[in-house]
Image (cartoon, helix red, strand yellow):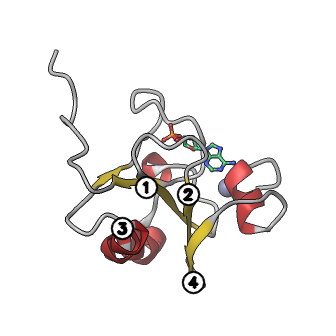
Amino acid sequence: MSDCIFCKIVDGKIPAQKVYEDEDILAFNDINPARPVHVLVIPKRHITSLATVSDDDTAVLGKILAKANEIAVAQGSPDGFRVIINTGRVGQQEVPHLHAHIVGGPEPVGPMLKRI
Ligand code: AMP
Ligand code: ZN
């Protein structure tokens, strides 16, 4: 997708602080971190969101989760982390290229969501 900001990062057209890369996925630091460790893990192939995935995406989705601990530990979150995948309008997804936020650091990240 030529107008997708995360596809441009994959293609090297805009810079990012990459922390992990293989043939299927790329991980880079969030430009506006919410916690000391805040990494985005994306499929290199454009997938808009969890609302648009198909069975063909199962392997890459599994890889994103399977690599999360390795990435978190390497970035300074050795005792756990949180994975967040905002999806669509209700999930308040801002960038329409599927991404998992890995947030953590030395201290607990805080409550999950405010109860309403
Ligand atoms: P979401 O609301 O789940 O779509 O989150 C999008 C995230 O992408 C936000 O946390 C932004 O700070 C982050 N972001 C946007 N542009 C960039 C960029 N060029 N490099 C790194 N992170 C970015
Ligand atoms: Zn994209």
What residue lies at 33% left-to-right and 72% top-to-bottom? 73
The number of discs equals 4
User: Element under label 4?
Assistant: loop
> Badges 4 and 2: C-beta atoms under 8 Å apart?
no
Distance from the alpha carbon under mark 3 to that under mark 4: 16 Å
Query: Looking at mark 2, is its residue's CB closer than 8 Å to ligand 1?
Result: yes
What residue lies at 63% left-to-right and 68% top-to-bottom? 45
User: Within 10 Å of the Cα at label 2, are there few (<14), some (14-19), or many (20+) other Cα atoms?
Assistant: some
User: Element under label 2?
Assistant: strand
Type of the residue with mark 3? Ala
Q: Position of residue 68 (x, y in %)?
A: 35, 69
What residue lies at 39% left-to-right and 72% top-to-bottom? 58
Work out whether mark 2 precedes mark 1 in sequence or the reverse, and give the earlier one.
Answer: 2
Task: Kindly identify which residue carries mark 2.
Answer: 29
Split into quadrants, the picture shows ligand 1 in the one at: top right
**Between tags 4 and 2, which lies in front?**
2
Distance from the alpha carbon under mark 2 to that under mark 1: 12 Å
**Residue 46 falls in image quadrant:** bottom right
Q: Is residue 13 depicted above or below 48 in this figure?
A: below
Task: Kindly identify which residue carries mark 1.
Answer: 100
Q: Residue furthest front?
A: 106
Residue 22 tag number: 4
User: Within 10 Å of the Cα at label 3, are there few (<14), some (14-19), or many (20+) other Cα atoms?
Assistant: many
User: Within 10 Å of the Cα at label 4, are there few (<14), some (14-19), or many (20+) other Cα atoms?
Assistant: few
Query: Looking at mark 1, is its residue's CB closer than 8 Å to ligand 1?
Result: no
